[in-house]
Amino acid sequence: MSPLPSNLPSTYSSIVLRERPKAEILPSLTDGKGTFSLVENQPLPTQLKPDQVLVKVEWVSVDPAQRGWLNDARSYVPPVKIGEIMRAGGVGRVVLAPEGSKFKVGDWVNGTLGWTEFAVARAKDLEKVTITKDIEPSYYLGALGMPMQTAYWGLMDVARIKKGERVVISGAAGAVGSIACQIALLKGCEVIAIAGGKEKCEWLRNEIGVPSVVDYKDPVFATNYKKLLGKTGTDVYFDNVGGEILDLVLTRLNKNARVALCGAISAYNTPNPRGLSNYLTLISQRAKIEGFIVFDYADRYDEASRQVGEWISQGKLKIRETRRYGLTEAVNALRGLFEGANSGKMVVKIAADGPKL
Ligand code: NDP
């Protein structure tokens, strides 16, 4: 194994889960009262198993799903354990690799690296990624990563959108939603976007090119939504938020409509999420409602990456990110998702002023 590059520090910091939140995530990191704790001065590993590499984490993801991983509940992945580094997607550079590893020092990699400055990872759990002047590392956490895959497969396989159909998308200015709007437009659908606040709605209308956008924070949102739809309902609803908005959209479904249940961020901080009142329209409209988890499409990721990569390089798909800087900012960045603090993908750069390779 080659020695560690001499310009790396001898210790590193990570954020670990301290206590499971009952509702909102509590932000403090150092007084023993928050959801997470900052663990500092951990010695940097210098010995690795043959199948491992050491990665200097450059960017980490914050995602609404992380709130669910904090609950001690049955789900599609086990909960994060108390004392464990907070699970998160990340992009970084290999700084130590054993002889014979498929990676070499300096390679950019993407994987579940966690909220940490350095991560020991199994080489088989990492994907080598290419960085160019147009493709920045953080894109692999959003427009070229899991949120894009979610938008793509939710529309193409769960909702099975067809040219000319009307597609309503909530959480439309977020990581998944903003890509979903653009894919549906590129596929020739009529898109109606739902987002919170004037700035996000204007961005969707003026820059993303969604002709019909409704602000759910407007007190007359329900009236505006129904007026916009007119006598025709929707063929597809791509739901990122659940709750009252889902219930409203259910009142205006077309025959054979498909509702792709992607997420329900309005309910994640609530111990007792509300149920639906308007589900009987599913019967009268012969409609389907179906939940999905993006990881089930892992063996088809290449297909979506190729198609979306092409759209990005042709300038047909726009990328927006909200960036925060510093490992400890990850907690507030995650809290911010529940307050609409992000447009596009929320990402955190770990070591804005940290050591460079
Ligand atoms: P976003 O980037 O969209 O961030 C969250 C956004 O949700 C906020 O910016 C905010 O936008 C909106 N929001 C927050 N609280 C509420 C609320 N109470 N009511 C309505 N909107 C709210 O997150 P992602 O794009 O990463 O994720 C979107 C959804 O997709 C989430 O529910 C997530 O869990 C789900 N998801 C599901 C996956 C799957 O495999 N099924 C995979 C990835 C994500 P605004 O300002 O407009 O309110």
Image (tube, rainbow, N blue to C red):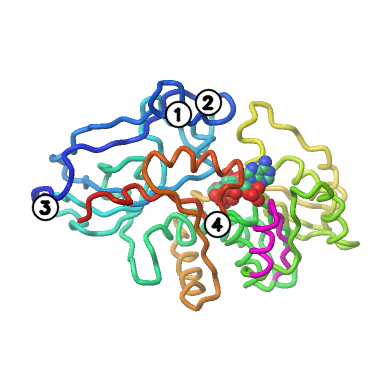
Q: What mark, if any, has residue 21 been given in the picture?
A: 2
- Disc nearest the viewer among 4 and 1: 1
First in sequence, mark 1 or 3: give its number: 1
Q: Residues within 10 Å of mark 3 (few under 14, many from 20)?
A: few
Asked whether disc 2 touches disc 1, contact meaning CB atoms under 8 Å apart, the reply is no
Query: Residue placed farthest to the front in the image?
Result: 353
Q: In percent of the image, x 55 and y 42: which residue is there?
A: 336
* Residue type (three-letter) at the residue carrying disc 2: Pro
Q: Is residue 293 visible?
A: no
- Give the spatial CA distance, label 4 vs label 3: 40 Å
Q: Quadrant of residue 213?
A: bottom right
* Residue type (three-letter) at the residue carrying disc 4: Gly
**On the image, numbered disc 4 is attached to which residue?**
344
Secondary structure under the numbered disc 2 in the rendered image: loop
Q: In percent of the image, x 52 and y 61: which residue is there?
A: 320
Residue 328 in the image: x percent, y percent? 39, 38
Q: Nearer the viewer, residue 102 or 180?
A: 180
**On the image, numbered disc 1 is attached to which residue?**
28
Identify the magenta region. Answer: 189-206
Residue 155 lies within the magenta run: no
Asked whether disc 4 touches disc 3, contact meaning CB atoms under 8 Å apart, the reply is no
First in sequence, mark 4 or 1: give its number: 1
On the picture, is 80 further left or further right than 126?
right
Asked whether disc 4 touches disc 2, contact meaning CB atoms under 8 Å apart, the reply is no
Q: Is residue 215 above or below residue 51?
A: below
- Give the spatial CA distance, label 4 vs label 1: 26 Å
- Give the spatial CA distance, label 1 vs label 3: 41 Å
